[in-house]
Image (cartoon, rainbow, N blue to C red):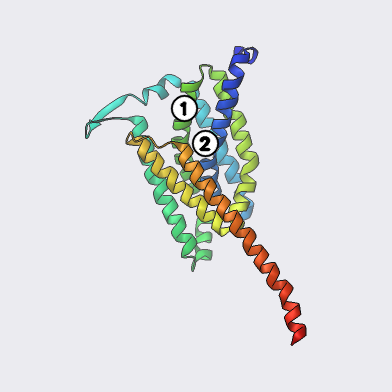
Amino acid sequence: MEWLFDPSQWFAFAILLLLEIVLGIDNIIFISVLTNKVAEEKRAKLRSIGLSLAMIMRIVLVMGISWVIGLTEPVFTAFDRAISWKDIILLVGGLFLIAKSTMEIHHSVEDAHEDAKDVAVSKGSFGIVAQILMLDLVFSVDSVITAVGMVKYVSMMVAVIIISVAVMMFTSKYIAEFIEEHPTFKMLALSFLLLIGMSLMGEGLHFHIPKGYLYFAITFSIVVEILNTKIRKKHQQSLLLRAPAVSKED
C-alpha cells in the first residue's frame, strides 16, 4: 500500500477510478435492462449479484495479471491479423451484446405479448445471471487490461475496482428505475449497448474506436431527449390550462 503515501500516485488513482466508473456505465445499463424484466422484488437482488460478480471477477483477474497480459499474446493468424484470446473474447462479447440489444429492442417495440414474456423471463433468474456473468467477463478483461497499462500497484487496482463497483451499486437502482419509467430513454440505452457491441467487435478486429466518440453520441442524444421531454410537458400543461377556458366559453 505504499502508493497511499506517494502523492504522485494519487492523480493516477483518481484518473483510473474515474475511467472505471465511466466504463462501468455500459455494464450498469446492461444489467438494468435485464433485471427490469423480472419481478420487482427480485431486481435489487439480481443487480447486486451481477455487480458483485463483476467485482469478484475483476479482482481475480488483477491477482492473475500475468495470465491477463498473456491474453494479449497472438494464438493464431487470420487474414494477416494476429488474433489473441483477448480479441476472441471481445468479438464474442460484442456479437452477444449486439444480438441481445437487438432482441430487447424488438421486444420493446413488439410488446403485444409482453406480459407473457415477462412471466417467462421472471422464472429464469439463473439465465439472467449467466448473461450478466458473460458480459462481466468481457467488460472485466477490457477494464483490467486498461488498468494494468495505467498503474503498477495491484493494491491500487483492487481499491479502484471496489470503489467503482460500490458507486455502480449505489446508482444502479436509480438508473434502472429511470430506464423503466422512460421508454424513450430505454431505447437510447439499448442503442448505446449496440454501439458498445460494435466497439467491442472493432477492438477484437484491431479497429480502435475511441470510447469518447460513443459517449459523446449517447450524451448528445440524451440531452436532445431531455429537451424534447420538457417541451412535451410544457405542451401538455398548456393544453390543460386551455381546457377550462374552452369549456366555459361553451
Query: Residue 4, how many percent across, how many down?
Result: 64, 15
Residue 37 visible in rendering = no
Give the quarter of the image for residue 24: top right
Query: Residue 63, how many percent across, how many down?
Result: 49, 21
The residue under the point 48% across, 51% down is 190
Give the quarter of the image for residue 200: top left
Badge 2 crowding class, 10 Å Cα cut-off, few under 14, some 14 to 19, many 20 or more, is some
The residue under the point 33% across, 24% down is 73
Q: Which residue is mark 1?
A: 146
In this view, 225 is above or below 52: below
Q: Quadrant of the N terminus?
A: top right
Point out which mark residue 201 bears: none
The amino acid type found where label 1 is placed reads Thr
Of residue 137 and residue 123, the one placed in the foreground of this image is 137
Q: Quadrant of the C terminus?
A: bottom right
**For the residue labelled by badge 1, is the local secondary structure a helix, a strand or a loop?**
helix
Q: CA distance from mark 2 to mark 1?
A: 10 Å
Of residue 109 and residue 37, the one placed in the foreground of this image is 109
Query: Residue 162, how many percent across, how many down?
Result: 60, 29
Point out which mark residue 23 bears: 2
Mark 2 or mark 1: name the one nearer the start of the chain. Answer: 2
In this view, 25 is above or below 232: above
Residue 131 visible in rendering = yes
Query: Residue 7, how many percent across, how many down?
Result: 63, 14
The amino acid type found where label 2 is placed reads Leu
**For the residue labelled by badge 2, is the local secondary structure a helix, a strand or a loop?**
helix
Q: Are marks 2 and 1 in contact (CB under 8 Å)?
A: yes
Of residue 21 and residue 236, the one placed in the foreground of this image is 236
The residue under the point 50% across, 31% down is 57
